[in-house]
Structures are given as structure tokens and as C-alpha cells.
Amino acid sequence: MPLYEVEEYLPACLDSIATQPFEDYELVVVDDGSPDASGDIASSYARRDNRILVIRRPNGGQGAARNTGVRAARGRLLTFVDSDDMLPPDAWSRMVDTLGQTASDLVVGNVERDDGNRRWTPPLMRVNHARDRLAVTVDEMPLVLADVFPWNKVYRRAFWDAAGLGFPEGVRYEDQPALTRAFLAARAFDVLSETVYLWRVRGDRSSITQRRHEITDLRDRFDTKRTSALLVEQHGVAEVARVFHADVLPVDMWEYFRAVPGCSEEFWQLLVAGVRELWNHRTVAFEHTSVPVQQRLMGWLVAAGRRDDLVRLLEFIDRGQGGLPVEGGRFVHPWRDEPGMPDSLVLAEPRHRS
């Protein structure tokens, strides 16, 4: 468990762990140079519970903190918890029991987002966790590559070490390449429909989206996507690569498309280059991905270098209901009658996720 400026949320997280019926665990808490009272709160819990070990280190980012915790952990199994989230009443028992029955390298459970008033399952998680599946591979279930979270899983420590797994350090979005590598390296994994993790929606999370216009944020995003895409390509299975580029890789790009009005020219040029590099005739063109049509159209305009038209599209969307209206089986937008406009951006046919 990495700690950084979570004093408001940490007690609820630690309490949700302390009340787990599965009691045979060691909790390694890594205070990543947090400037608030997070480390002191963790230490107070450690004084009351000898299963908790607190390590303090200079700030190095979440990836470095997790790697520090892994090196200190002594258990045969390994899992992660973010210190601003919570565990449901029995998060680990079923996962540990499942690994005891199979030869799989890791087990993956479902996730619910929690904003304090309601809980819901993200769309791709609903697809991946619709039913239990034991001892499957990434070739059989490529959409699992969308599950880039480290904390809704239990890993065999022997697998983690043998595969050389770890988190990139000094970069944002370190989860995607780490988890992509884990799924590709696994001989088999188990998937459970049961919710094993509560991903909290923090009241200050808007500050994260506000950073989307920063060139460093975009550069880190493309770096981690590029690394993950290379791992998938090296895996060498065409259908896995297709699903990855169509269903997994584009899901968060709309936030950067949204940042284009008012962005710097450097940001725009990096955005265009990254979209062209990752979504093209060799992989999957952005207009043929499975994200909503308004996002596909945004990506198509970016790849074409049409900044002014993208700004117009965002204004058009914001004047409506957040999506594109449909008339006579066709999407309504200013470019739908333009010569060469792809059918996927014009025809409102049902689309089926892979």
C-alpha cells in the first residue's frame, strides 16, 4: 500500500482491511514521503496490529513505492491496495481459495466505483466479469487487457518474480504496462464475477482531469501506451492485438481530445503524432475502434490534423446531450456528408464489442 497525501481517506481504508475475515496477511505500507499525517496514521495502526509494517522513503512516485513494498513483502501471495480506496467485507477469501484449486498464476475479481452515495461497475469490467472463468489465457480473453488495475488481483509471488514483474518508475500511468506484462506472461489466470475492490471516487479527482492539457501528462500517457502496445505486438497473436488497439488502448483518449481548445501547439503536435502512431492502417484506425462514435470522430479529426474542426465538434457536442444525435439511421454532425467520411462515423448501426 503506497501512501501519499491520503490522511482523509486512510483510516477507512485501513479499517476495511482490519475487518477482513481472511486474517493471514502482512500489510506493507510504504510512506512515499507524504507531507501530511498519512505516515503517522499508518504507524498508529501498526502499533496496534503487528501484521502492519510501515516503510518510509523519499518521494519517488506510486510505481517506486509499490516496488519497495513488493521487495519487503514475505508472503506466498501478493496483492495491492491504494490507500484512498476500500475493500468490501470479504475481498480476499474467494480469490485465495480459487488459486488453491487451480494452477493459475493470478486471479482477478470485479471492481465497483464508490462515490459515497452509490456504487457501480465500469462498463468493461461488467463485460469481463459477467461470469466466472477459471484457468483462461489472454488469447482466449483478450479484453482482459483493459483491466489495468493492480489491486483487484491476487498473484502468486513465485509467478511475479519469475516473470520479472514490477512497475515503471518516474512516470504516470505505470499500471498499464505492468498489468499488460502480467497477463501476457501468465500461463493461465482466473476471473471471478464477485466484487473484490471498492475504487473510491475522490472529491478532488477533478484536479487529475485538469492536468490533461499538460504536455508531461500526455507524454507519459503515450509512453505507457507505446510500451504496452509493443508488449502485445511481441506476443504475436493477431486477434489479441486487434482487440487491444480497438477496445483497450483508446478508452481514455477522449480526455486529451477534450483538452485541445486552448492547448499549446506542442501539445497538439504530440497528440496528432501519438494518435497516428498507435491507430493506423497497420493496427486499427481510430474511427474503427469501439469507443462511442463522438470519440471516434474526435480521433479521426486528430489523425487528420484538423484542430479547428475538432474544436467545432466539441462545441457541437456540448450544445447537445454529450453524444451525436441520429436521424434516419445516420449520425448527425457537420462532416457526415463529406467525401471520404468513413461509414463508422456516419451509419448508426449497432456495434458489438469484442
Image (cartoon, grey):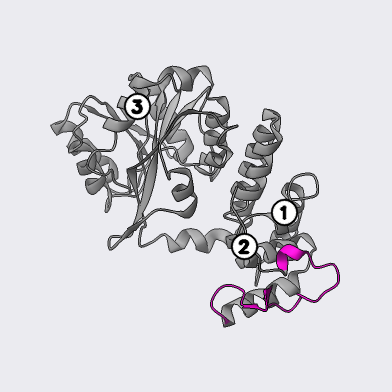
The outermost residue toward the bottom is 319
Position of residue 161 relative to residue 66, above or below, is above
Q: Position of residue 329 (x, y in %)?
A: 67, 74
User: Quarter of the image holding residue 324?
Assistant: bottom right
In the image, residue 305 sits, relative to residue 86, either above or below, namely below
Task: Identify residue for label 1.
Answer: 275
Residue 98, numbered circle: 3
* Residue 272 in sight in this render: yes
Q: Which residues are magenta?
A: 320-345
Q: Secondary structure at mark 3?
A: helix
Looking at the rendered structure, the kind of residue marked 3 is Thr
Rendering quarter of residue 323: bottom right
Given residues 307 and 57, the one toward you in this image is 307
The amino acid sitting under disc 1 is: Val
Q: Nearer the viewer, mark 2 or mark 3?
A: 2
Determine contact: label 1, label 2, CB under 8 Å. no
Q: Mark 2: which secondary structure? A: loop
Question: What residue does disc 2 label?
Answer: 350
Task: Return the disc, 1 or 2, that comes first in the chain's sequence.
Answer: 1
| Residue 174 seen in the current view | no
Q: Is residue 93 above or below residue 126?
A: above
Instruction: Give the quadrant of the N terminus.
Output: top left
Instruction: Estimate the x, y position of residue 173 in percent, counting from the top left.
Output: 53, 45
Residue 215 percent location from the top left of the image: 64, 56
User: Whole-percent x and y of residue 316?
Assistant: 64, 79
Per the image, is 332 magenta? Answer: yes
Q: Residue at x 76, y 75 (%)?
A: 335
Q: Amino acid at mark 2?
A: Pro
Give neighbour class at mark 2: few <14, some 14-19, many 20+ (Cα, 10 Å): few
